[in-house]
Amino acid sequence: MPKMKTRRAAAKRYRKTASGKIKYKKQGLRHILTKKGAKRKRNLRKAGLLSDPEAKRARLLLPYK
């Protein structure tokens, strides 16, 4: 059986934590930052965790991570 291929787009967006959860960088912190509040920008800096159904789909795209 040949090796499965990793979806490169998913590999660049998602990382697996030690406990097996999938984390990602939140969107909305690249430009047009002047109208966003400091609290909102501060919270966007933190990594987000995928919900269980979304994490299940992401694991299919990342077979070796």
Image (cartoon, rainbow, N blue to C red):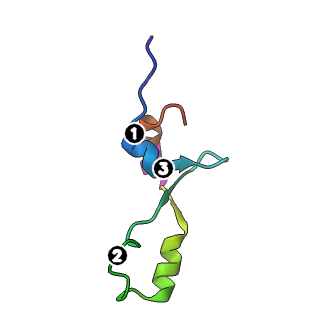
Horizontal side of residue 33 vs 42, given as left or right: left
For badge 3, the amino acid type reads Tyr
Question: Which residues make up the magenta segment?
Answer: 51-56
> Regarding mark 3 in the picture, which secondary structure is present there?
strand
Amino acid type at circle 2 is: His
Does residue 29 show up magenta in the picture? Answer: no
User: Residue visible at 39% across and 39% down?
Assistant: 8
Residue in the foreground of this view, choosing between 23 and 53: 23
Q: Nearer the viewer, residue 31 or 63?
A: 31
Q: Is residue 55 magenta?
A: yes
Amino acid type, mark 1 = Arg
Q: Which mark is residue 8?
A: 1
Residue found at x 62% / y 49%: 17
Q: Residue at x 48, y 55 (%)?
A: 50
Q: Residue furthest left?
A: 32
* Residue under label 3: 14
Residue at 46% x, 19% y is 3
The reply, left or right, for residue 49 in relation to residue 54 is right
Name the spot of residue 21 as percent of width and height, x first. 58, 49
Q: Where 54 sits versus 62, above or below?
A: below
Judge the density around disc 3: few (<14), some (14-19), many (≥20) Cα neighbours within 10 Å. Answer: many
Mark closer to the chain start, 1 or 2: 1
Q: Magenta: predominant secondary structure element?
A: helix
Q: Which residue is mark 2?
A: 31
Q: Nearer the viewer, residue 55 or 9?
A: 9
